[in-house]
Image (cartoon, rainbow, N blue to C red):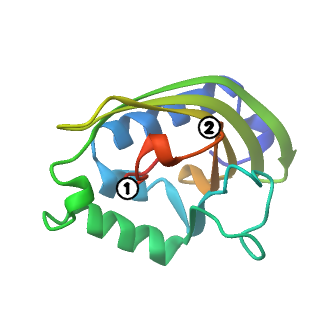
C-alpha cells in the first residue's frame, strides 16, 4: 500500500478493523500483534477523564509495545487465572470514520460493543469508542495507537478488563 493514507478508503479501514476484531475474538493474539507498529500504544483511559493523558492521569491501561507483548504472553499462560479458561468475546464495530489524514497517518474513530462471556459470571457488555492512529506503509495498515474509551459511568459492574478490549 504505497502512496500514503490518501489512497486508503473508509471501506479498507473498516475491513482492517473487522479483521482486528476477529483476531481478538478468536484469541489469535500473535496475529493481532502483527497488526501493531514497533512503537504501538494501547490505552484505556479512566471513565471520569476519557480525554486525559496517560502522562498525568491514572489510566486503566497505558501500555507501550513491550507491555502489550507482555500482556499477550500472560494471557496465553494457563496460570493467568483472570483469563483461564479464556473469556469468549464478540465485538461489533460500527460508525467507522476517518477523522484525519497526515502523510502516511490516519486518525480513525469507531464505535464498539464487546460482549464478554465467562464461565460462572453474568454476560458483560462493554460499550464505547475506539480512537486509532493508523500508519499506512508497504506492508499495509498498522496500528500505532489504540485508545479505547468505555462509556460506562463506573467500571465495577463490568468486572476486570483482563482481556484486550
Q: Position of residue 162 (x, y in %)?
A: 37, 56
- The secondary element bearing badge 1 is classed as loop
Q: Distance between the Cα atoms at labels 2 and 1? A: 17 Å
Q: Position of residue 109 (x, y in %)?
A: 72, 37
Sequence-first tag of 2 and 1: 2
User: Looking at the image, which is closer to me, 119 or 12?
Assistant: 119
Q: Position of residue 159 (x, y in %)?
A: 41, 47
- The secondary element bearing badge 2 is classed as loop
Q: How many marks?
A: 2
* Residue 10 sits above or below residue 41 on the image: above
Residue 84, quarter of picture: bottom left
- What label does residue 14 carry, if any? none
Identify which residue is drawn at 26% across, 57% down: 82
Identify which residue is drawn at 78% across, 66% down: 53
User: Looking at the image, which is closer to me, 59 or 158?
Assistant: 158
Question: What residue sits right under mark 1 in the picture?
Answer: 162
Q: Residues within 10 Å of mark 2 (few under 14, many from 20)?
A: some
Q: Position of residue 14 (x, y in %)?
A: 59, 28
Identify which residue is drawn at 75% across, 36% down: 7
Query: 77 left or right of 25?
Result: left
Q: Residues within 10 Å of mark 1 (few under 14, many from 20)?
A: some
Assign the N terminus to one quadrant of the image. top right
Question: What residue sits right under mark 2 in the picture?
Answer: 152
Camera-nearest label, 2 or 1: 2
* Residue 77 sits above or below residue 45 on the image: below
Identify which residue is drawn at 85% across, 42% down: 100
* Residue 81 sits above or below residue 120 on the image: below
User: Looking at the image, which is closer to me, 81 or 32?
Assistant: 81
User: Looking at the image, which is closer to me, 94 or 84?
Assistant: 84
Amino acid at each position: 500500500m504505497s502512496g500514503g493514507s490518501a489512497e486508503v478508503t473508509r471501506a479498507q479501514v473498516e475491513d482492517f478493523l473487522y479483521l482486528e476484531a476477529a483476531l481478538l475474538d478468536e484469541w489469535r493474539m500473535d496475529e493481532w500483534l502483527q497488526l501493531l507498529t514497533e512503537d504501538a500504544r494501547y490505552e484505556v483511559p479512566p471513565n471520569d477523564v476519557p480525554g486525559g493523558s496517560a502522562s498525568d492521569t491514572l489510566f486503566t491501561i497505558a501500555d507501550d509495545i513491550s507491555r502489550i507483548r507482555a500482556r499477550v504472553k500472560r494471557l496465553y499462560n494457563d496460570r493467568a487465572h483472570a483469563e483461564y479458561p479464556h473469556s469468549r468475546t464478540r465485538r461489533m464495530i460500527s460508525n467507522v470514520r476517518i477523522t484525519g489524514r497526515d502523510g502516511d497517518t490516519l486518525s480513525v474513530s469507531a464505535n464498539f460493543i464487546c460482549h464478554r462471556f465467562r464461565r460462572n459470571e453474568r454476560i458483560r457488555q462493554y460499550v464505547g469508542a475506539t480512537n486509532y492512529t493508523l500508519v499506512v506503509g508497504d506492508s499495509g495498515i498498522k496500528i500505532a495507537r489504540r485508545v479505547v474509551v468505555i462509556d460506562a459511568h463506573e467500571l465495577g459492574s463490568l468486572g476486570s478488563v483482563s482481556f484486550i478490549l
